[in-house]
Image (spheres, rainbow, N blue to C red):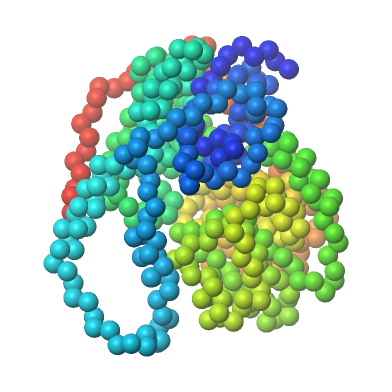
Amino acid sequence: MTTVAQKLLLIARDFPPDFSPGVPRIERFARNLPESGWQPLILAMEQEAADSQAATKLDDPSLNSIIVERCRMKKWYRSQPAAATTNKSQTTASAPPEGKQPAQSETPARPSRLRPLRQWCVNLKDLLIITPDKAIGWVSPAVATGKRMIREHNPQAIMTSGPPHSIHLIGRRLKLATGLPWVADFRDPWARRPWGHKKQNPWGQNLYPWFERRCVETADRVILNTEAMADDFRRFYPQWESKFLAIPNGCDGHLVERIEQLLEEVPARGDKEPLTLTHAGSLYRERDPRPLIEAIALLNQRGIAIRFEQIGNCSGDFNIPTFLRDHDCGEYVSLTPPVPRDEALRRMAAADLLLLIQPGTDLQIPGKLFEMLPFRKPILAVAHAGATADVINQYQLGAVATDHTPQAMATVLEDLIQHRQRSDADLRWDKAIHDFDGRTLTAELAATLNAVTSGSDDSPTTADVETPPQVTMTS
């Protein structure tokens, strides 16, 4: 193993045992960087007990040897239980279907003259306390903790990973204060083409391009997790084209070993048992499972026995229990609350097909796709043409449903079931797992860190402070 000679201050909101969709990427880098001569120092957010999403145990020696410091968000910014929001979602989700009226007569509510003023006040509050996002209250405490860690441990470089993208403001401030090279890792787009409709902070969203530009101009390198995102940044910032590179998510070696163990424990499925299509992860915004559930029902009506297993949170906006009852298809669907990560892997190992839902974007590939590779099971991707579909099609990992109507998805799924056994399956999965090997991808990160710390790169010159764009305050 290469002697560890340099240290990296790696800043992200979450790190094990806290778990969120971005954690596997950070954990992968932290686990494998020492092999390439870099020792990570982790700065993460200390979560409130109610906010913690602990789903993994920090019992890995390679992680226990890493220095991890956590600091809390400022009290003013800490999220409070959104009772009003929850009630609103529940009211919307439980509204009677079209054609059905409540038992009691109701007088239509008159539009309140104060509604525009209330909305104006909400928008102003969002602008002041969640711009650019809800993690902004962590910036000052993290900068203070980061400065102390730099004094105590003398790292040679800084790396930030977002979202939340306000974390990149921490990296920018630390670079300007210390002069250390800074690498910004964008797991999702920020100012342009963000995934999913954002209802909050309409005024603050006007400032996203200004924040992004200041971070891009100051960073020594900007890493994107798909080549499509890297191309998007190169087109938008041609003056800094050489800064951008793509390092995708990948497969973790220790995870591959664990999945292989779980696959060996799966009992043989009986001929009369229905096939299982499993999705392990949250469903929200554009990740609407209802058309797929209708497709599952159509296949069962055609005599193709298949059931859908959802493991994880499902937005109340979809009101799935009512949907299942109204469409009389509850027998084909099982809904399971979030489970520990190892249990989710166990259920994925027992599945016949795996589901990936990523509509509404052509730039992003969910990290879940790379977690699916070691299972070597056909993947149904509900996605539009773009980065996710390209990987599925290039490696022939399954099928992509670009038409998201129930009838079209039923046709794609039926074809996938009929052709799920292929003679070249092992070769295809072997190549995908090899090309997205986490150790190799982390070595690319290490090479980038070597370049920005060795002086072989031209360090960017920080531009003069710009005036933020004017925020249009409309109700």
Residue 72 occupies which quadrant of the picture? top left
Q: Quadrant of the N terminus?
A: top right
Question: Which sits in the foreground, 473 or 78?
Answer: 78
Instruction: Give left or right: position of 43 versus 59.
Output: left
On the image, the x and y values in percent for residue 159 come to 49, 26
The residue depicted at 48 percent of the width and 34 percent of the height is 46
Question: Relative to 180, is 290 above or below?
Answer: below
Q: Is residue 288 visible?
A: yes
On the image, the x and y values in percent for residue 257 come to 78, 40
Residue placed furthest toward the left: 113
The residue depicted at 16 percent of the width and 58 percent of the height is 117
Question: Relative to 22, is 183 above or below?
Answer: above
Residue placed furthest toward the front: 49
Residue 216 occupies which quadrant of the picture? top left
Question: Relative to 99, is 403 above or below?
Answer: above
Q: How many marks?
A: 0
Q: Is residue 398 visible?
A: no
Q: Quadrant of the C terminus?
A: bottom left
Instruction: Give left or right: position of 452 versus 91.
Output: right
Instruction: Give left or right: position of 400 versus 210.
Output: right
On the image, the x and y values in percent for residue 413 come to 66, 67
Question: Relative to 282, is 1 above or below?
Answer: above
Residue 408 occupies which quadrant of the picture? bottom right
The residue depicted at 51 percent of the width and 76 percent of the height is 322
The residue depicted at 18 percent of the width and 75 percent of the height is 110
